[in-house]
Amino acid sequence: MSQASAVAYANIALVKYWGKRDSALNLPAAGSLSLTLNTLRTDTMVHFDESLTHDSFELDGRESDPRKLTTWLDLVRARAKLQTRAHVVSRNAFPTASGLASSASAYAALAVAASSAAGLSLTVRELSELARRGSGSAARSIFAGFALMHAGTKADGSDAVAEPIVGADDWDLRMVIAVVGGGKVKGVSSRDAMEHCAATSPLYQAWLDCVPNDVQAARSAIDARDLAALGAITRDSAMAMHAAAMASRPPVRYWQAATLRCLDRVEELVGSGIPAYPTMDAGPHVKVLTDAAHCQEVARAIGEIPEVTEVKICAPGPAAHLLSEASD
Ligand code: 2P0
């Protein structure tokens, strides 16, 4: 009987991940680059309990279907040579499965908690790989601040891991998140959407062709602390990803009318000289990259849009970490 608790924070990709080279091992088709945020937090407790006959999963106070979790926990059990079932309790400090990157913080927190509870002592690289098996973006949430995810080339996926590039304290940017439509659960999962896009979108290959240059340019912009350069890549990568998704047959469209209103408002801000660069994930919400000096003004401007139900200002956030050591 062994238990551990961990916390992890969601990340928002500045250069997006959209498409896989292997679905079974969840290997990305291209690299990506992200910023871990300080407020989108998941707390997870894992308890391997001899008295259980199956895994149980409580998410945000409700019993949830444990099937996907069991498949992932089997990886941990195989590595730890363990048969024991687990009780998992997880809580998100933000809407689940709505395009606010809840699976990223979820599987990063799970990787840290479950490996510790199982008695494993994994390196951060191994934690990143384990988190990736649950959700591609989770590999990046193992790390603080800016993280670079490698597509890797190995068939076993051991090189498809993230690495930290610039820490949370090393560049004081802000991500302003406009929650559109109350953060309701999205219609089509990003996993299904990216598979459908890869299979049917005439723009999918063009999208993949953009990514290596965008990752390289984003790295250079981060090294130079050049917000205008990083912001332009952030905006362009998101638009290219959504263009590829929208060109799927039938289309995958996460945008709502309020999404466009947010993008219009961001353009107005840019027109008045404010650094504001939008990005969007598998949901209608708009996230705006800006700096500490302008984040309040950006938040006020997009908060005025009627369908924007909540605005969060996030700063670079910490790495996933244990809250309590494993105990017997
Ligand atoms: C990203 N997204 O880079 C991209 C941009 C959504 C849009 O990673 O299938 O839950 O579990 O590996 O990580 C969301 O997809 O996908 C995502 P899986 P994941 O953040």
Image: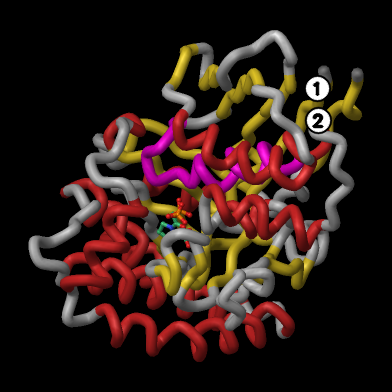
Q: Earlier in the sequence, mark 1 or mark 2?
A: 1
Relative vertical location of residue 205 with respect to residue 71 in this rendering, above or below: below
Q: Of helix, strand and loop, which one carries label 2?
A: helix
Q: Is residue 317 left or right of residue 307?
A: right
Relative vertical location of residue 206 with respect to residue 264 in this rendering, above or below: below
Residue 272 visible, this angle: no
What is the chief secondary structure element of the magenta stretch? helix
Instruction: Tell me where the magenta segment starts and ends, as one range.
Output: 95-112
Residue 186 visible, this angle: yes
Q: Quadrant of the C terminus?
A: top right
In-front residue for pair 102/293? 102
- Name the image quarter holding residue 43: top right
Residue at x-position 54% and y-position 48%:
134
Q: Label 2: which residue?
A: 117
CA separation, marks 1 and 2?
Answer: 5 Å
Q: Amino acid at mark 2?
A: Ala
Residue 83 at x, y = what percent?
Answer: 70, 29
Q: Of helix, strand and loop, which one carries label 1?
A: strand
Relative vertical location of residue 94 with respect to residue 23 in this rendering, above or below: above
Residue 84 at x, y = what percent?
Answer: 71, 24
Point out which mark residue 3 bears.
Answer: 1
**10 Å neighbourhood of mark 2: few (<14), some, or many (≥20)?**
many
- Name the image quarter holding residue 169: bottom right
Q: Amino acid at mark 1?
A: Gln
